[in-house]
Amino acid sequence: MNFLRILKKKFMVTFEMNFKPFNKPTTEGRQMSALITITEEQKNLDFEELKNLGSWDNAKRWFPIDQIEDYFGSIRYPSRTWNNSYFNAAKTQKFLKWLKSNHSDLIKIAQ
């Protein structure tokens, strides 16, 4: 006999499957042309600049805006234990180079 059926019969236990898939925060209502200002010699982005390029959910996971989402395709999806995987990847020199070459409309270079 099935284990759940035995439990249900013996202890009159009812089971409810209320699993909700995780939905990342949406960018609806946010300004999609998020501008970040960097200097010419800047090598990577800091916290204040990355704030404009994404949002956090209730579990303190950072998710990028839809325009730059394709960069993070090969990076581990954030979880409660590894909540900074996307954020740490966005702090690198490689990401800043990619951002300059693919989405120069998001960057404003300070004089």
Image (cartoon, rainbow, N blue to C red):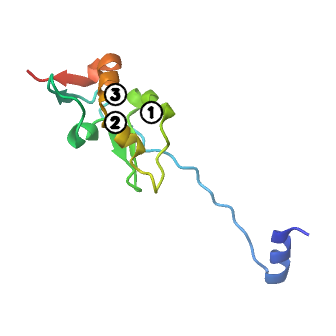
| First-in-chain label (3 vs 1) | 1
Amino acid under disc 1: Phe
Relative image position of residue 89 (x, y in whole percent): 37, 37
Residue indicated by mark 2:
90
User: Which of the 4 quarters of the picture holds residue 8?
Assistant: bottom right
Q: Is residue 16 above or below residue 45?
A: below
CB atoms at circles 1 and 2 under 8 Å apart? Answer: yes
User: Which of the 4 quarters of the picture holds residue 109?
Assistant: top left
Relative image position of residue 16 (x, y in whole percent): 69, 66
Residue indicated by mark 1:
72
Amino acid under disc 2: Ala
Circle 3: is it few (<14), some (14-19), or many (20+) Cα within 10 Å? few
Element marked by disc 3:
helix
65 vs 87, nearest the viewer: 87
Q: Is residue 27 left or right of residue 1?
A: left
Q: Is residue 60 above or below residue 9?
A: above
Residue indicated by mark 3:
94
